[in-house]
Amino acid sequence: MLNQIGGIHHITSIATDANKNNRFFTKVLGLRRVKKTVNFDVPDVYHLYYGNEEGAPGSAITYFPYPNIGTRTRGSGEIGITAFSVPKGAMGYWQNRLVEMGIANLQSSERFGDARLEFTGPDGEGLAMVETDDDKRQPWIGNDIGTDVAIRGFHSASMSLKDEGAMRELLVFMNYEIADTKDGVTRLVAKKRNGADIIDLQTAPASDNAQQGAGSVHHIALAVDNDKDQAAVRKALKDTGYAVTPVIDRNYFHSIYFRVPDGILFEVATNNPGFTVDEDRKALGQSLKLPHQHTHLREQLEQTLPVIED
């Protein structure tokens, strides 16, 4: 059993249009764009990060905007809904705001006693707000949303699976505990918490396998404090039989990756060094930042990447 995992670090998804994506997460949801960089493996594609003031682990949702990518096919073996934490009593504000801004497919519900508002993002991705009354994380309030209703970070991720058994076993191994099961949902909570502590498992045995496209979650990253903890997690996963990548330097954190039989791609990312390693806190997300292996492409990328209008 591992004890180094501390909840969700970030969640990365796929989009089509960088400007549409940026407008939604900054203007509609009120998050801060904390980094404008490129996909390390496909440098002519942006990698955009949104979160709280510093994009702290547990707050950062990130996107690869591929202009010509097809639409996702929903099904099993994917993260179906990414949920954000908002303060108790904020749901009315968000219901009205999202309606006024033309956001589609709003559905109010309750899960494990918490008020919940599900909706779809600009590429049809499944998103939700969940009211919580004990989230002490500081929100970003640089947009027009007050601190009494602003997003605190992630609340949870909901995974759609044909059989939850293997995923439940993996998450328990990775320091999650089963909190409750109700209405076909099994909730697991990280024992070492960073605020983004919850993963919900939803089973649909008859569903087809999901196919990635615009609106899909590309991967979910879990958090560890440092390189030493990451090395211990990597060894334990490899000893258990998972094919885990070597450590990859992502500039703002160090990462390892492995894929589970359900098809979901996991990352384990360090909390350090963070997004201020190459930008001042006040200027986060404003300039195009390139990983060292792509700095020679700057002139080309600045001419070909779409200009993001703030």
Image (tube, helix red, strand yellow):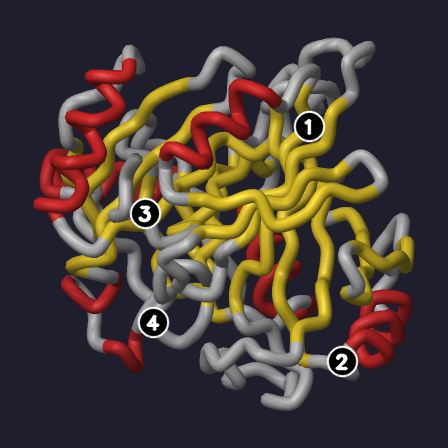
Residue 54: give its label.
4
Viewer-side residue, 300 vs 219:
219
Tags 2 and 3 in contact by the CB under 8 Å rule? no
Q: For the residues carrying marks 2 and 4, which lies nearer the camera in this image? A: 2
Q: Is residue 127 left or right of residue 142?
A: right
**Residue at (30%, 35%) from the top-left corner?**
1
User: Is the residue 79 above or below the residue 96 in the image?
Assistant: above
Q: For the residues carrying marks 1 and 4, which lies nearer the camera in this image? A: 1
Dot 1 or dot 4, earlier in sequence:
4
The crowding category of the residue bearing disc 4, from other C-alpha atoms within 10 Å (few below 14, some 14 to 19, many at least 20), is many
Q: Is residue 70 left or right of residue 271?
A: right
Residue 5: give its label.
3
Element at badge 1? Answer: strand
**Residue at (85%, 40%) from the top-left corner?**
183
Residue 123 visible, this orientation: no
Instruction: Return the x and y of residue 310 as percentages of the image width and height.
Output: 52, 68
The crowding category of the residue bearing disc 2, from other C-alpha atoms within 10 Å (few below 14, some 14 to 19, many at least 20), is some
**Mark pair 2, 4: CA separation:** 23 Å
**Mark pair 1, 4: CA separation:** 30 Å
**Residue at (69%, 23%) from the top-left corner?**
72
Dot 3 or dot 1, earlier in sequence:
3
Which residue is tagged 2? 90
User: Please, what is the three-letter code of the amino acid marked with disc 3?
Assistant: Ile
User: Please, what is the three-letter code of the amino acid marked with disc 4?
Assistant: Glu
Element at badge 3? Answer: loop
Tags 1 and 4 in contact by the CB under 8 Å rule? no
Viewer-side residue, 309 vs 24:
24
